[in-house]
Image (cartoon, rainbow, N blue to C red):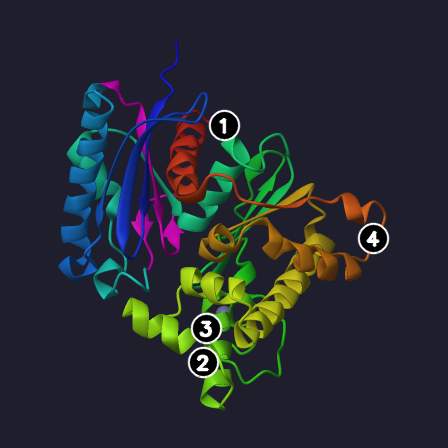
């Protein structure tokens, strides 16, 4: 019988999550989490990654020999063929051209599959989350940035250079003065990410608008306006926050409409920190805007735009599933 037990790893800027996944049913058999500590550099973080994987195997009461392979989601572009990380902006310059695949393979003597974190998240939601049973799916994750992953004919659609699905950098406002991290102006990410909402709230407060946000920041001793704080201020009826959220929702709706006009998927799954905090009600105005901008309006009200279901586990489950698929040739 085929061994369906794979390791999935989600390598994030703040934390590292490894899980032993039964890729037959998506069950987490064991897991381990620790801080990434990017200041240690690529080699130091790779050591921590190996230790985290071993802990997850222990947690599942298994041995290394019970594992069929390892999938890793990395926050940046990857050379999927060689397992070399092209770049990881939020982890630092030591990751440029770092051979993460070879490093982990040397430790475990197991086959390794790498892809970017958003792609593996999309595969997770498609396999065992909100997109299960839909062969044409688009996933959009709204957090610090905005990322996307496309599933077509039940497989991850990678594109010619493995860079498809970069929905966060679709230009929605070319004449905008808002510069994106990528250097372009008016990217979707500058208009509908958590960071965009934070920027608009700060601008309104700076221009003298009354808001509960400064009080919440002081109380919680935080500097950044997290998804949690946005949610709390929104629930308290804070006008500044509600206006910033409404603007982000509108642009997310426009982004989804453009993607639907391009791809015509069966379902759009929306995840990430903002959605995890705000929930289903966040999508109500998003759906309305999207529907107004579909070119093909036939059955448009039935095109599901839904919340992601796996939360922080989408990445590890997706990485494990992707490892099984790629290592078994499909
Ligand atoms: Zn951009």
Q: CA distance from mark 2 to mark 1?
A: 48 Å
Q: Nearer the viewer, residue 154 or 329?
A: 154
Look at discs 2 and 1 and give the one toward the viewer: 2
Q: CA distance from mark 2 to mark 4?
A: 38 Å
- Provide the residue designation for mark 2: 202
- Provide the residue designation for mark 3: 198
Q: Residues within 10 Å of mark 3 (few under 14, many from 20)?
A: many
Q: Is residue 17 above or below residue 327?
A: below
Compare marks 3 and 4 and give the one earlier in the sequence: 3
- Provide the residue designation for mark 4: 296
Residue lying at the far right in this picture: please name it. 298
On whether ligand 1 comes within 8 Å of the CB at mark 2, the answer is: no
Look at discs 3 and 4 and give the one toward the viewer: 3
The reply to whether the C-beta atoms of the residues labelled 2 and 3 are less than 8 Å apart is yes
Label 3, secondary structure: give it: helix
Q: Nearer the viewer, residue 143 or 54?
A: 143
Label 2, secondary structure: give it: helix
159 in the magenta segment: no
Left or right of 265: which side holds 98? left
Look at discs 4 and 1 and give the one toward the viewer: 4
The N terminus sits in image quarter: top left
Q: Is residue 207 above or below residue 94?
A: below
The reply to whether the C-beta atoms of the residues labelled 4 and 1 are less than 8 Å apart is no
The reply to whether the C-beta atoms of the residues labelled 1 and 3 are less than 8 Å apart is no
Which residue corresponds to the image point at 52% horizontal and 62% vertical from the top-left? 235
Q: Nearer the viewer, residue 23 or 27?
A: 27
Residue 300 visible somewhere in the drawing: yes
Label 4, secondary structure: give it: loop
**Residue 288, percent from left and from top:** 74, 58
**Residue 289, percent from left and from top:** 72, 62
């Amino acid at each position: 019988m085929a061994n369906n037990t794979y390791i999935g790893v989600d390598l994030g800027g703040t934390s590292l999550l490894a899980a032993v996944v039964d890729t037959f049913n998506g069950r987490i058999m064991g897991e381990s989490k620790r801080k990434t500590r990017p200041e240690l550099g690529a080699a130091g973080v790779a050591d921590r990654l190996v230790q985290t994987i071993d802990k997850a195997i222990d947690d599942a009461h298994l041995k290394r020999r019970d594992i069929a392979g390892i999938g890793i989601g990395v926050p940046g572009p990857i050379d999927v063929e060689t397992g070399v990380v092209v770049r990881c902006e939020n982890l630092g310059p030591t990751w440029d051209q770092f051979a993460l695949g070879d490093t982990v393979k040397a430790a475990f003597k197991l086959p390794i599959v790498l892809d970017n974190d958003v792609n593996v998240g999309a595969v997770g939601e498609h396999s065992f989350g909100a997109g299960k049973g839909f062969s044409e799916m688009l996933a959009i994750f709204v957090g610090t940035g905005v990322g996307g992953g496309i599933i077509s004919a039940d497989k991850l659609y990678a594109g010619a250079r493995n860079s498809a699905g970069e929905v966060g950098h679709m230009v929605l406002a070319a004449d905008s003065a808002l510069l994106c991290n990528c250097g372009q102006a008016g990217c979707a990410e500058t208009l509908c990410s958590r960071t965009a909402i934070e920027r608009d709230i700060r601008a309104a407060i700076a221009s003298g608008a009354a808001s509960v946000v400064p009080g919440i920041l002081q109380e919680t001793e935080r500097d950044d306006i997290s998804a949690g704080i946005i949610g709390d201020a929104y629930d308290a009826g804070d006008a500044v926050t509600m206006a910033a959220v409404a603007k982000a929702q509108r642009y997310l709706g426009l982004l989804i409409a453009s993607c639907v006009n391009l791809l015509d998927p069966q379902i759009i799954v929306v995840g990430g920190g903002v959605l995890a905090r705000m929930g289903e009600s966040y999508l109500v105005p998003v759906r309305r805007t999207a529907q107004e901008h579909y070119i093909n309006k036939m059955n448009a009200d039935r095109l599901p735009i839904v919340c992601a279901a796996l939360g922080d586990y989408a990445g590890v489950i997706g990485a494990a599933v992707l490892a099984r698929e790629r290592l078994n040739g499909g």
